[in-house]
Amino acid sequence: MKYNDVRKTFLDFFKEKNHVIVPSASLIPNDPTLLFTVAGMVPWKGILQGTEPAFAPRVADVQKCIRAGGKHNDLDEVGFDGRHHTFFEMLGNWSFGDYFKEGAIEMSWELLTKVLKLDPKRMRVTTHISDDESTEIWRRVAGKDAIRLGDKDNWWSAGDTGPCGPCTEIFYDFGEDFQNEDDRWVEIWNDVFMQYDRDANGNLSPLPKQNVDTGAGLERWVALLQGKTDNYDTDLFQNLIHATEDIVGVKKTDENVSAFKVIVDHMRAVGFAIADGVIPSNTDRGYVIRRILRRAMRYGQILGHRGALLSKLYPQLVTEMGDAYPELAREEKRVVEIIQNEENAFSEMLQNGIKLLDNEIPNVQNGILSGDVAFKLFDTYGFPLDLTQIILREHNIDVDVAGFERAMQEQKERSRANTKGTRTLWESQTELVPTDDSYKYAPDDKLESRVLAILHNDEFVSSANPGDDVEVALDKTNFYGTQGGQVGDSGELANPNGATLMNVTEAARVGNVVIHRGQLTEKISVGDTVVTRINKNTRQQTARAHTATHLLQAALQHVLNEDVHQRGSKVSPDSVRFDFSFGRAMTDDEKRATEDLINKWINADMPVSHEEMSLDAAKQRGATALFDEKYGDTVKVITAGDVSCELCGGTHVYHTGEIIRARINKEKSISSGIRRITMSVGTMAE
């Protein structure tokens, strides 16, 4: 059976068994604890744990997965055996309170032996030592005496507490040629029976609704059904390998087979991830994909190839898997462009780094490269430590990892010392009480405050004089301190009689303290009573700009696609700077359409609501948020009509008409896969 036929046979079988067939969920999971969808059960986690209702009693799917980051990481093993992958497909059939052990075991055995016609004599089954029911079912259904194992192998749980239960696994004998038992007996299916709820004391109580969660690796099935012991010898991988041979101009041999395995495996991970919206970057899942892409390019270099590689190979991936995953073809232009940008940037870095390594290798002593040299590669050329290790492995050289980490820590300490300024000094004031800035959203010109601290010439002083440039902390303020991309308010500090004491050029936030920067016009002392007065014209223009930024993001998602996400912003009274994920330059028509849509929403004078609610309530409403932002239990949600709903602590207008107008000034690239728009709003856009 061909690779694609096996996938179809699995789904067709369970469709006949009254399962609803659903497409794969995204590789980007709706789970903040995971970088990627690492298993077939991830999209169903809420249903399996009883926090979400099931939409059907029986479901089957083939879920795309990546295990290449965090605790689920097979990256370093890829290329050195025949069964590890960064990207793989997990076959799964699911019962949400419908059939249980007997139904799952019967269908597993029927599919394997009656449909796929595997030899029953070459299969073993295992059950949990406590699961007499499954053991007896296997004896009755298959005439198999199960091997009974303990919690380590045959028990599944969501955590220390909550849903859990025994599982039964099916192993296939790949033959006596394998002396290692783990290579000879390979797990091909696992049925998990979610039977109990475990409390904090370890007590098990039967669940009112019992579920079945199954998983089977498609790559392993295909190898087995095609009579192969190496997944990479199956038709899908062989077609990708032949395409790679054409690109690099080298044939696969026993000596270079690892390089070909790495390239075709990594092509799948990179291609599928970017098609799902992951942008290569230096953080989180974007970093993992960048690392995988660069690892593939390095192995292309080992084969003697220079220049584009995965971007040329991607069309073959579409040919092989595009029918099952139409998003590959739909996103082809964008994916290829993003990969090309990454390859171009990395090629120059790789050549510079290799030159440095070539110069250092003759100086290596005892087969270990200095950690300082490895750090120089990282710091100067952007070489990740693992890439240096891959290159040196060819020369049987290790890296002093402890020395690398020490050099990294020393640099961080130097950086902290070099940036020691007002922020560090304010952070050192641990006795300073937090500023009450609850007045910042509805500022009152008559707000009286007390001076708590004064910083002048990098020293905290009890008083300062006219003409001094100072930073002042108050017990309460109506100034918005720079935070979340929005610049802080400007204004004045006055005495209770109304005379100006200080011209405040910017308010800034350091931890829980709002500091007021500016120049004194009169003497001021700790303990003085002052009146805070913000510049209302500047505040109004900043609020216009901030709400316009939310409309800009909504418009980009409408005009370009829903995968466009904010990657940074700066909101100031005179302009907006907005960074977003997108793999190419916008066309003039797209920029015009985006600007027109924003102004259409402005002219509609839609209401803009400002609401505080729990983080869970905000998520249920569908409010968007920055991926790496940290939020408390209570959040502020800004909703503009029915076009935008975002978590945001900034200042905003109350009707979109207050923005007056928006004008896109410029759109450009600032890094691979990241674009930047600058925009004028309000009176600045007229």
Image (cartoon, helix red, strand yellow):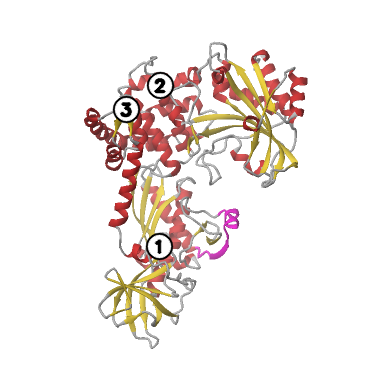
Q: Which residue in the structure is indicated by mark 1?
A: 486
Between disc 1 and disc 2, the foreground one is 2
Under tag 1, what secondary structure? loop
Is residue 212 in view from this perspective? Answer: yes
**Image quarter of residue 373:** top left
Amino acid residing under circle 1: Gln
Is residue 586 in view from this perspective? Answer: no
Q: Is residue 648 left or right of residue 102?
A: left
Mark 3 or mark 1: name the one nearer the start of the chain.
3
**Image quarter of residue 130:** top right
Q: Is residue 354 left or right of residue 317?
A: left
Judged from this view, the residue extending furthest toward the bottom is: 497
Q: Is residue 569 magenta?
A: no
Locate residue 503, reporting x and y percent: 32, 76
Residue at 52% across / 53% down in the picture?
A: 624
Mark 1 or mark 2: name the one nearer the start of the chain.
2
Q: Which residue in the structure is indicated by mark 2?
A: 258
Q: Which residue in the structure is indicated by mark 3?
A: 397
Amino acid residing under circle 2: Ser
Q: Nearer the viewer, residue 435 or 267?
A: 435
Q: Which residues are magenta?
A: 604-622
Q: CA distance from mark 3 to mark 1?
A: 49 Å
In the picture shown, does residue 461 fall above or below 657?
A: below
Mark 3 or mark 2: name the one nearer the start of the chain.
2
